[in-house]
Amino acid sequence: MPEQQQNDKIYFSIDGKQVEGRKGESVIAVADRYGIYIPRFCYHEKLSVVANCRMCLVEVAKAPKTLPACATQIMPDMQVFTKSKATVASQRAIMEFLLVNHPLDCPICDKGGECELQDLAMGFGHTESKFHEPKRSVDDENLGPLIATDMTRCIHCTRCIRFGTEIAGIPELGATGRGEDMRIETYLERGLHSELSGNCIDVCPVGALTSRPFRYRGRSWGFNQHIAFASHDCIGSNQYIQTINKGYENKTEIMRVLPKKNESLNQTWLSDRDRFSYLGLRHSDRLTQPKLKRNGIWQSISWEEALNEVADRTIKTIKEHGAKECGFLLSPSTTNEEGYLLTKIAKQLKCPNIDYRIYSSGGQKEINPSTFSTIEDLSSLSSKKTILLLGSYIRHEQPVASIRVREASLAGADVFSINPKHYDWNFPICESIQVAHDNMLHFCAQVLVSACKIKKLPLDDAWKNLLKKIRSSAKSDELAKKISENASCIIVGEYAQSLHNAGLLIEIINYISRITGTDKLLMTPGCNARGLHMIGAIPGQKDGKTSGLDCHALLEKPKKMLWIHQFEPEFDIFNPKRAITALKNSDTVVCFTPFETKAMREYANILLPITPPSEMSGTYINAMGQMQSFQASQEHLGDSKPGWKCLRVLGTLLGLEGFVFRAIDELQQEINTNLVKEMPDTLPDMNQLDWQKEPVQKSLVHRIGIKPIYRVDGIVRRADALQQASAVQKMVVRMHSKTAKAFKVDQRIKLRLRMEKKSFCFPFKIDDNVCEGCIDIPTALVESRELGGTSDWVEILA
């Protein structure tokens, strides 16, 4: 052990027990580590120490009075007494003081049964109070559709204030007044808009802040608790799903979702998207019976009839038109079990057309996933470290990962944003570099050239011809120097992965990573993109070359039959207009889906109701390569079935081999045997690339199409409380003032534009945060279903 670490050790006693701590630690931190309980309200292990509740007062030998354990640093040979007469007397006095104004409404409080004040009142409270004056009453705050308030219960611990300021990075709550007149309020009465606001419910030790959707719905002791993982981003935050006890009702219903502590992933936090998305699971759009379209009329049918119909049509299509006239598209949030069986079906049918990368506008090859081993390592990137956010608004795409980047930034790491917009970050940014589309590819190529120059390494032969026109710049030299000299990380986000040249862009990042020793973290859309990549749910290979069609190519020319698994093309695919057209022109479209939509009823022929993650068992592999296994937390709704069971039966009906699995454990064992543990780097097509791509017409600008935080998938889109909390309710297009002036539209309130040969008119705002020469048009909204691709050209109509 290093000498410095030896010298940092401090030995002292708590209640006569010899304990060991480190220099700078508090008494309460060491006590917690040894399982010695000290009551507290304001103290939280992840928040700063304020010592304002005084509930943790303890007796310390030779101290003139009891001291707050949270703010008292340990010293050699210190003697601490947590159960002495002086300690108990102090804690009882504080408890009595806190209860002076606290309402006696425990029977109706949602915090009842898990309230820290309630527990400590039982342990340290008096049976009678000395105070008989009327209790104070405080007006409730309107914090929005997610958090309900009963501010009369507030004990001014300020945990919620410190969470917003220190963890979420958005100081939305503050304290006004003094003494009995002190109030916890929002600034300017604007409510809470943080994507992590629900954590205020968890840190509140009383019932002042509670979940509005959960309000008055149940009691904690009546719930069953299930371990689960977040299914809306690639981190896989650990969480508990609590369902209603069947003793109360003859059904299983999710009551709420809470974070499960995991220091290596989400610590003790959970994003609002993961916490409240369960509200969409029982939406009226849920598909509960298999359906078949006969002569343009939808009819409910049995599972046996539905699966036989799918098998018969598949066999007929292959027999008459060949296997290459079939295609399989699946969501990047598909479980490993479903993805493996789909891939197995495609391979045995000799159909190479399968892809999970529905978010990409094409050009992707096989991508070697992240080299980052754990997201916890992000927090350790402190001073003299560099983080590059490439095409990533990590705050909305991966809210829990954003906490780690914030920790690193506050510790001194230099964070650079390389994005198509200047985003509203919740941590210090060293510099925001505005680039979009091919300019992003060009800039990354410049950084690669600069890195080779700094490292005094020649370009690989395969790259020389491609990059012969690339010249480094002062900015690229600066960035290359920073990531070469420091332990750095490049985080590649959803925007970068959606571009037409995403494959080449990521290979450039791979090259930079290799020669500079920089880690890369591929923050993929969906929760299981890495798992599906390892399974091989990508276009088939033959003689080292891609023989199958990716998602982009499958939509270019309609196929006779398409299987759509676990996503809604009108919202989730990179080009919804082209997708719907291709689907309508196909002879047979089979949708494996938890929800049915109006558009789906128009283009589909068979609808199979499969369960969402909460109603089935399965596994995911997150962006760091960690396998996460979960079990069903509630019963199937209606006649819906887990997707892997449907695919298992379909494989048998199609006459394929290896689809006899008696239980999911047998399937998972086969998957683990066949997983590709390491994906080799493969160089994209090195044909001539026009680095200075210009629009065909001067009236064209590039679209920046990014999904709003609460539109990422079908479940989140149907969670009404999240939709009410979203700042993006309706379509508003945005453009830089210089771009708007160039097109002479800077004075307009509405803007007319054309995509896919169709014109649209949307509300318009000038926004200098948008990259020049581009137009920001959100995707996955109802109004965007008829638009073109997320990174296509847009024509501005005069």
Image (spheres, rainbow, N blue to C red):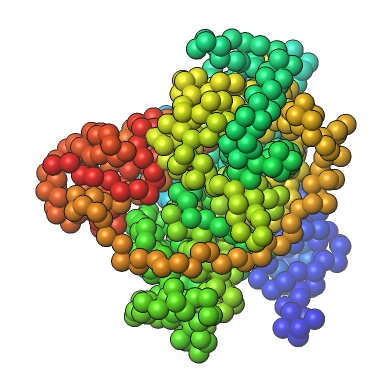
State the residue in front, 164 or 529.
529
State the residue in front, 124 or 255.
255
Q: Is residue 369 left or right of residue 195?
A: right
Q: Residue 574 at what x, y percent from top left? A: 45, 43
Residue sitting at 18 percent across and 53 percent down? 698
| Quarter of the image where the C terminus is located | top left
- Quadrant location of residue 131? top right
Residue lying furthest bottom: 456
Q: Residue 211 at what x, y percent from top left? A: 55, 31
Residue lying furthest front: 320
Residue sitting at 29 percent across and 40 percent down? 755
Q: Residue 443 at what x, y percent from top left? A: 38, 69
Q: Residue 19 at what x, y percent from top left? A: 82, 66
- 709 versus 772 height, above or below: above
State the residue in front, 89 or 351.
351
- 440 versus 210 height, above or below: below
The total of numbered circles placed on residues is 0
Q: Is residue 467 left or right of residue 678?
A: left
- 416 versus 223 height, above or below: below
- Quadrant location of residue 469? bottom left
Q: Is residue 759 left or right of residue 725?
A: left
Residue sitting at 39 percent across and 66 percent down? 689
Residue 798 in view, yes or no: yes
Residue 566 in view, yes or no: no
| Quarter of the image where the N terminus is located | bottom right
State the residue in front, 725 or 783.
783
Residue sitting at 66 percent across and 65 percent down? 680
